[in-house]
Image (spheres, rainbow, N blue to C red):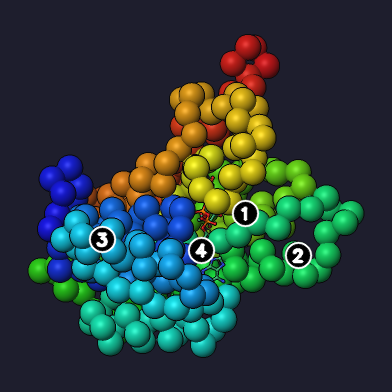
Amino acid sequence: MASSDLPSLKGQTAIVTGASSGIGAGTAIILAEAGARVVVNYRSKDDAAETVIDTIRKAGGEATEVQGDISKEEDVIGLFDEAERIYGPVDIVFSNAGLQRDKAIGEMTLDEWNAVISVNLTGAFLVGREAIRRFRKKGLREDVSAAMGKLVFDSSVHQRIPWAFRANYAASKGGLHLLMESIAQEVAEEKIRVNAVAPGAIATNINKAERESHLDEMLKLIPYGRVGEPADVGRVVAWLVSDASDYITGQTIYVDGGMTLYPGFRGNG
Ligand code: NAD
């Protein structure tokens, strides 16, 4: 099925990493609504991936779950192998999995640095590299999509806005920005499109504590006046992987209610 206000992704297979919660779950549901067969990747066994699959199936969509830690090379290769075994060639990849380990710079351990970089940056490299390899193996299928493959990374406004006490996270997303643009430049001539979404504050587990303790402070940073929902990001991803955006590659779409507009300057700075 394809919902009428979403671009059609009928006949295409999508992998979403870290899709058992938050933005990944919301996007998996929307890609399925747009008609894609969706592979819901999750890191460790829990019921949440099942809930995402159930939601998709109940709405008439197609989805399956595949376990894998995207910071591990063998797991990423296994994820794509399993996706191809179940649904055939992969057309769409949303590299979404990510985490935070906040700490003052003087107290940050090497483990806390590596924990974030290994998922948010190295994991994105592993997933992005495998996506490109599999798109090449599949080739162009013009009856399905104008592009040979569509890869979207989940970055953050913190690829641009520095973030005290979260240097590991901001560095991972800053690195992801140029990783995305460099891959996009390298593969554009093969008709592979590579883009990113950069969410602001979206209501998920990653910021649950901050939303509970500092909602008013958070809202001061969002000109549009509300915290975002996973579907706000999912709808943009659905468009970015559809032929409606066929001439767009190497771009970041900020999905942030205006957070990157420096709202502190509204009162003359
Ligand atoms: P979330 O915690 O709900 O989702 C993150 C998901 O990634 C979880 O399901 C988690 O299990 C998964 N994950 C973590 N490590 C993994 C690994 N090694 N292998 C596979 N999966 C793994 O939070 P979210 O907000 O939905 O985060 C999703 C992405 O959005 C992240 O990359 C995050 O940096 C980005 N983001 C979120 C916000 C926000 O405000 N929520 C803002 C900007 C960017």
Report the Cα–Cα distance between label 3 and label 2: 35 Å
Q: In which quarter of the image is the C terminus?
A: top right
Residue drawn at the location 66% of the way across and 64% of the way down: 116
- Looking at the rendered structure, the secondary structure element under dot 4 is loop
Q: Residues within 10 Å of mark 3 (few under 14, many from 20)?
A: many
Q: Is 245 located above or below residue 79 in the figure?
A: above
Give residue 108's position: percent from left, percent from top: 83, 59
In the figure, is residue 257 to the left or right of 31? right
The amino acid on which the numbered mark 3 sits, given as a three-letter code, is Ile
Contact, mark 1 vs mark 3 (Cβ under 8 Å):
no
Give me the disc on residue 56. 3
Q: Look at label 1 and name its amino acid.
A: Gly
- In the rendered structure, the answer to whether residue 26 lies left or right of residue 244 reads right
Residue at image position (48%, 70%) is: 46
Label 4, on which residue?
97
- Number of the front mark, 4 or 3: 3
The answer to which of 126 and 140 lies nearer the viewer is 126
Query: Which residue corresponds to the image point at 53% horizontal and 28% vertical from the top-left?
Result: 222
Crowding at dot 1, Cα within 10 Å, few <14 / some 14-19 / many 20+, comes out as many
Q: How far apart are marks 1 and 4 (CA)?
A: 16 Å
Q: Which of marks 1 and 4 is nearer the N terminus?
A: 4
Q: Earlier in the sequence, mark 3 or mark 2?
A: 3
Does residue 191 appear in the picture of this structure?
A: no
Which residue is denoted by mark 1 in the rendering? 174
